[in-house]
Image (cartoon, rainbow, N blue to C red):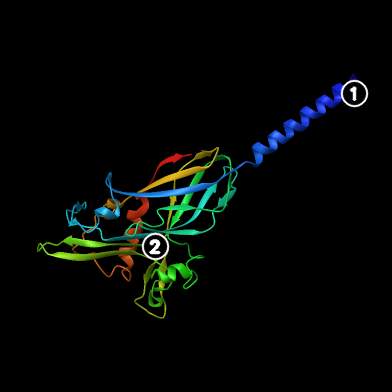
């Protein structure tokens, strides 16, 4: 009788341990979906090539191209542990491609104090010629500007003070002062976007929205009449884009 009780207890302990291990070791697949808006109005490529938006400075404008790079998606634990998803994603709104990104890296279920990603590449990853797919997408930055890759290409047309339709190109890269070509001076302008704390209990999709209008208004009121083109070699313009980009992205929801 005692033997039966002992065996019974051992079976319960083994089952309990197995159950605990299943909970502890359970993992979830994660995806990120990117949508776009202009101060709350949805923007897709079907809205491109029409002058229908007004920036905070008062210029009417269109969007003809929007591409940007997302990298280093990171899940942060409160104990300092970090889980970084492999890969990067070139979101191309113009061609409606890569609006979703899924990693082969599975995330342990549980509580995370923060989830973050980079807009652009950090310096360690921003290596000229390192990514064949980005090379073929003409995403490179000229060596005279330090090489590496773009962070964003936002292009369209706007109506200037003479009521003329003029092309603009807001291209974001690592800020560089190339006034002395032999001694380039850089400033980091990739942006770490923090989405806040989340609980992962199963496979999850993070729905991220970019408010395109924010690039033109906060904290720097953007005057397209003076900052409409040749922004890549413009150190101060790159810093302003970096500053305006701090509030561009937001987490809309996390869905199973």
Q: Residue furthest left?
A: 162
Q: Position of residue 60 (x, y in %)?
A: 17, 55
Residue 185 image-quadrant placement: bottom left
The relative height of residue 81 versus residue 224 in the rendered view (above or below) is: above
Q: Nearer the viewer, residue 42 or 40?
A: 42
Question: Which residue is under mark 1?
Answer: 3
Contact (CB < 8 A) between labels 1 and 2? Answer: no
What residue lies at 43% left-to-right and 71% top-to-bottom?
A: 135
Residue 65 image-quadrant placement: bottom left
What residue lies at 49% left-to-right and 46% top-to-bottom?
A: 115
Residue 49 image-quadrant placement: bottom left
Instruction: Decide if residue 86 is on the left or right side of residue 219.
Output: right
Where disc 1 sits, the SS reads helix
Instruction: Decide if residue 186 is on the left or right side of residue 87.
Output: left
Instruction: Decide if residue 30 is on the left or right side of residue 215.
Output: right
Q: CA distance from mark 1 to mark 2?
A: 69 Å
Q: How many marks?
A: 2
Question: Which residue is under mark 2?
Answer: 151
Q: Nearer the viewer, residue 125 or 209?
A: 209
What residue lies at 45% left-to-right and 67% top-to-bottom?
A: 133
Residue 218 seen: no
Q: Position of residue 125 (x, y in %)?
A: 50, 65
Residue 234 seen: yes
What residue lies at 34% left-to-right and 76% top-to-bottom?
A: 179
Q: Position of residue 2 (x, y in %)?
A: 90, 20
For disc 2, the neighbor class at 10 Å (few under 14, some 14 to 19, many from 20) is many
The relative height of residue 10 versus residue 239 in the rendered view (above or below) is: above
Report the quarter where the N terminus lies.
top right
For disc 1, the neighbor class at 10 Å (few under 14, some 14 to 19, many from 20) is few
């Amino acid at each position: 009788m005692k033997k039966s009780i002992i065996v019974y207890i051992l079976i319960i302990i083994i089952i309990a341990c197995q159950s605990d291990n299943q909970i502890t070791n359970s993992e979830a697949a994660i995806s990120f979906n990117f949508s776009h808006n202009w101060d709350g109005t949805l923007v897709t490529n079907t809205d491109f090539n029409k002058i229908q938006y007004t920036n905070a400075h008062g210029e009417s404008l269109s969007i003809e191209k929007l591409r940007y790079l997302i990298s280093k998606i990171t899940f942060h634990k409160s104990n300092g542990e970090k889980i970084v998803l492999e890969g990067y994603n070139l979101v191309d709104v113009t061609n409606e491609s890569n609006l979703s990104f899924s990693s082969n890296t599975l995330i342990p279920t549980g509580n995370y104090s923060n989830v973050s990603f980079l807009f652009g590449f950090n310096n360690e990853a921003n290596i000229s010629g390192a990514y064949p797919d980005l090379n073929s997408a003409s995403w490179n930055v000229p060596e005279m500007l330090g090489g590496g890759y773009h962070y964003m290409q936002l292009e369209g047309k706007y109506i200037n003070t003479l009521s003329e339709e003029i092309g603009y190109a807001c291209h974001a890269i690592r800020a560089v002062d190339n006034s002395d070509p032999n001694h380039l001076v850089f400033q980091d302008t990739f942006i770490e976007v923090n989405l806040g704390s989340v609980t992962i209990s199963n496979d999850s999709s993070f729905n991220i929205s970019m408010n395109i209008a924010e690039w033109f208004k906060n904290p720097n009121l953007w005057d397209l009449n003076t900052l409409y083109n040749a922004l890549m070699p413009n150190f101060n313009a790159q810093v302003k884009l970096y500053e305006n980009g701090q509030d561009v992205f937001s987490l809309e929801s996390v869905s199973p």
